[in-house]
Amino acid sequence: MTESNSHTLRITGECELPHSLDQEKEYKITVTGQVDAIEKKNQHDGSYEFRHKFRLLTAELIEEGGKIVKLIDKTKMSVKFRKLLEDNHAIRSLDGDSENYYKAFMKFLMSPEIIEPLLDKFQWNEKN
């Protein structure tokens, strides 16, 4: 007798939370992602288990009252760059808010006299 196949979903990835979550509560989270791989495992009873490896791309936390909070993917380059600047602000013990520091640095970085020489030096190909 052939048993029916089973299908499982393994979700991987991380997102930055806006605040701590309570262990005693249940939460509703919506995720967007993609299946990176499907592993076929023989159950030795005529059936197979198909394990779908799902990589998280974006997520939203639905809080009490229905408020939707977008969660930040910590692996995105823009998030890593912002974190680098925030850490730099803290390490150097600079005055003012780190968000204002970030905005001022980005404005400086995007100025033509800074960005154009960087773009001239950058050698793009698909393997970067």
Image: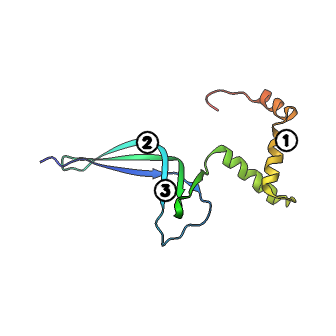
Mark 3 residue type: Ile
Q: Looking at the image, tell me whether mark 1 or mark 2 is earlier in sequence order.
A: 2
Image-quadrant location for residue 69? bottom right
Report the Cα–Cα distance between label 1 and label 3: 37 Å
Q: Looking at the image, tell me whether mark 1 or mark 3 is earlier in sequence order.
A: 3
Q: Which residue position holds label 2?
A: 35
Say whether residue 32 is left or right of residue 97. Answer: left
Q: Residue furthest left?
A: 1
Q: Nearer the viewer, mark 1 or mark 2?
A: 1
Q: Position of residue 4 (x, y in %)?
A: 21, 48
Q: Residues within 10 Å of mark 2 (few under 14, many from 20)?
A: few
Looking at the figure, which quarter contains the C terminus?
top right
Give the label on residue 108, or none: 1
Q: Position of residue 124 (x, y in %)?
A: 69, 27
Q: Residues within 10 Å of mark 1 (few under 14, many from 20)?
A: few
Mark 1 residue type: Phe
Give the label on residue 50, or none: none
**Residue at screen point 53% across, 63% down:** 65
Q: Position of residue 12 (x, y in %)?
A: 48, 51
32 or 56, nearer to the observer: 32
58 or 126, nearer to the observer: 58
Mark 2 residue type: Val
Q: Nearer the viewer, mark 2 or mark 3?
A: 3
Q: Which residue position holds label 3?
A: 29
